[in-house]
Amino acid sequence: MSLTRRTLLAGVGFAALPLPPAVRAVALRGVRGADISFTLQEEAAGVRYRFRGRTDRIENILRAAGATWVRLRVWTAPPPGYSDLDQALRLAARAKRAGLKVLLDLHYSDFWADPGHQDTPAAWAGQDLATLTATVRSYTADVVTAFARQGTPVDMIQTGNEVTAGMLWPVGQIYRPSGADWAGFTTLLEAALTGARAATPRGHRLLTMVHIDRGGDNGGARWFYDRVGVAFDVIGLSYYPFWHGALSALSANLTDLATRYGKPIVVTETSYPWTMANGDPLPNLLTDPSALPDGAAYPPTPAGQAAYFRELRRILSGVPSGLGAGFFAWEPGWLPGVGWTPGEGNPNDNLTLFDWSGNALPALTAAYAR
């Protein structure tokens, strides 16, 4: 998710390329997930979560509600306490004990990476393409190995976060729609995928995802996936209605991408408001209900939020050939008390699946019920 979202690829002409040859899709079904990367910070801040009258850890609550996956973010050298490898390893161990699978989200950045920010880690700055390629391959393999060594091998990995405009800028930045600057990005992406596969234990299936932010933008999604040119298993899309348009646009995009590419598709990030109030002094990203394109059907209330997740699941279930694999709610437990950066507040506290006292909202059941 971008916390400073801005329009990317503006003015790009999304000229269609010929349909790629049909591919054999990997089997992926029933993904009902949540990104829980802020969990340890929330717990340190004193947050407690409750579901059906019982206080428990968030991963146990998610599993009891019907969730099947968690998503864990790793930054390369973040501020202390923020989504480093050690935190992800700890959360992976907890998630696996709860019976949940793990999607690993590598940002290849010291802090937030999104379509408008793909900063190369400071320790890697100045490396040329050949050197950076080797660094990315080795780093990815080392991270995946760390999960395997503690007995929690990664089940799916996204090598980069919302890489619509590339990654590891400037070497891996996609500058122009002509494709002239895709080579650096695809070389780095291939290195990441190679490192992940090489480090996966023998006999364990690792699914690979390439994740962009164009959930409601079919032209933009086709522009990217027509050109990316690397082998991977799963299409990942962010979809936030207040940025990406109506659910009808998401539905049309999923239908076309499934038919065009023959790959499972996961809505890798999504959220929806349950209130327009604010839980801390920092203004929220979403403050105007008119920004919700389907707000009449799904108002920013607990009931409206639950209805949104029911409709999202219905849309995914109707994707051709069963390729609507599922979704991840983004940081459903990110309650006031933990800032997006040290010393700041939480701009997403009205998009959670728990109220500000930690009580599960109706959308938790709507999103994850089996």
Image (cartoon, rainbow, N blue to C red):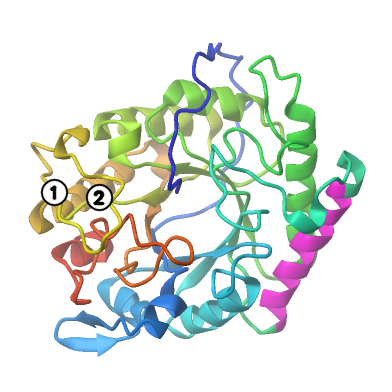
Q: For mark 2, what is the residue?
A: 272
Image location (x, y in percent) of residue 249: 31, 28
Q: Are marks 2 and 1 in contact (CB under 8 Å)?
A: yes
Q: Quadrant of residue 296?
A: top left
Q: Residue 342 or 136: which is nearer the viewer?
A: 342
Instruction: From the top left corner, tell me how far across and down residue 4 is, in percent.
Output: 44, 43
Q: Amino acid at mark 2?
A: Tyr
Task: Say the numbered circle drawn on residue 271.
Answer: none
- Prevailing secondary structure class for the magenta stretch in the rendered image: helix
Relative to 193, residue 343 above or below: below
What stretch of residues is rendered in magenta?
132-149
In the displayed structure, 307 sits above or below 291; it is below
Across and down, in percent, residue 353 comes to 24, 64
Q: On the image, numbered disc 1 is attached to which residue? A: 300
| Image quadrant where one finds the C terminus | bottom left
Is residue 340 magenta-colored? no
Q: Is residue 285 left or right of residue 33?
A: left
What whole-number distance in Å separates the C-alpha atoms at marks 2 and 1? 8 Å
- Percent coordinates x, y for residue 127 in the rendering: 87, 46
Q: Is residue 8 left or right of residue 179?
A: left
Which residue is located at x 59 percent, y 74 percent?
80
Q: Earlier in the sequence, mark 2 or mark 1?
A: 2
Q: Residues within 10 Å of mark 2 (few under 14, many from 20)?
A: many
Front residue (pair 150, 107): 107
